[in-house]
Amino acid sequence: MKPEQVVYFDNSATTAVDPDVMTEMTPYFLQRYGNASSLHRYGMDAYEAMEHSRENVAKALGSSPKEILFTSGGTESDNLALQGFAFANRKKGGHIITSAIEHHAILHTCEFLEKEGFSVTYLPVGPEGIVSPDSLRNAMTDETILVSIMMANNEIGTIQPIRELAAVAHEKGALFHTDAVQSVGKMPIDVVRDGVDMLSLAAHKFHGPKGVGALYVKKGVQLRPLTYGGGHERGLRPSTENIPGIVGLGKAIELAISRMENDTARMRSIRDKLMNGALDIPDSFLNGHREKRLCNNVHVRYDFIEGESLVMHLDMAGFATSTGSACSSKSLEPSHVLTALGIRKERTHGSLRITLSRLNTQEEADRFLQVLPAVVGKLREMSPIKSWDDYEITGNEEEEECHTANE
Ligand SMILES: *Cc1c(COP(=O)(O)O)cnc(C)c1O
């Protein structure tokens, strides 16, 4: 089977580029390939295209275009926000607060900052994956300079009470960053209404190209660059701008916002069908919050089977999905997100994530639900574990790095 014959249910990992986005980008590879810093008309043309995209991004977030920096994606935006802010504001304090369920682009950056002498608090979440504003309030100290909590989680789809969390951060004079990589086009965003000081996004999660993203930085917030070079992006992100990518980002975000109402309603209805069908199978559980959840995310857990085998068997049956546990190494280190929900390690492994885009259909969901029970049933038949009484922890328990894509 070719990839294009397989139904794609892994849109939190990445999405297809929209044909209209591709059409918009193509001339900037072939004919209009100028460097935005050049003084001739190739340069002016590239510069204008870049600024048009910046306006589209700003409009989507409710910010001013001057507050938008282009980057190479979600990871760089998260790094620039956290490292850039921490190093530029060290004199004000050395404490950062984040949550235990952030993407590794945040968590591993925080671990690096700890090695550099900052202290970091990783807030726990409730059983449904919500960060409570009270737990944030209790963790705030006079040293806290920055709070970073994601708008919606990439594994379990949980939506955080961003406005309340930002208000708590501000009570003590800290700034608030949010990783909104999974949220663009799936929920309304307004940095002014929500009190967000920095926000990360990535084009490839909403039908734009890979390798391009943006960071919103509220006027007046000081950052230190991660790299040094020319004066591009106010010196905060030197390097010749990725004009085709930036053009693609601008078109993709414009499309995502203008279609959001219809697209989210459709995705939500397909999601609910999939969620109900997937949970009709015995010994299944929903991960995350039932209502405060992205319109495109289904995340369920099946006892007594391995998520990796489930994903591989579903791939053979014609469906591209993802496991909940972000690691397939021998040590079977479970996903940090599922562990943070308080799910016992041996019960995290049979997780399945289905994530939709505007391209998915009800008919795909119907076909999926026709094969899922049989695949789960077959794997359970093959499983040596039929009840938790059979379960014995074997093998080595040492931690291994996780590298399986589960963004
Ligand atoms: C995908 C993702 C990222 C990383 O974005 P890249 O563009 O792949 O670097 C960061 N945070 C979240 C929540 C994501 O889903």
Image (cartoon, helix red, strand yellow):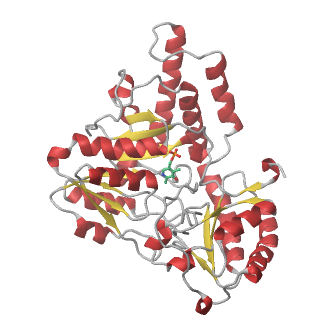
Closer to the camera in the image, 159 or 368: 368
Closer to the camera in the image, 22 or 193: 22
**Left or right, 176 with reference to 305:** left
Where is 297 relative to 238, above or below?
below
**Left or right, 397 with reference to 248:** left
Q: Quadrant of residue 12?
A: bottom right
Most extreme residue toward the front is 396
**Left or right, 211 with reference to 80:** right
**Left or right, 213 with reference to 204:** left
Most extreme residue toward the right is 1
Viewer can see residue 119? yes
Residue 349 image offset from top left, x and y in percent: 59, 73
Q: Quadrant of residue 134?
A: bottom left
Closer to the camera in the image, 277 or 255: 277
Residue found 50% across the figure and 13% down from its top: 43
Residue found 52% across the figure and 55% down from its top: 187
Most extreme residue toward the top is 40
Residue found 42% across the figure and 49% down from its top: 190
Residue found 40% across the figure and 35% down from its top: 68
Viewer can see residue 62? no
Where is 184 relative to 208, above or below?
below
Image quadrant holding the C terminus, namely: bottom right
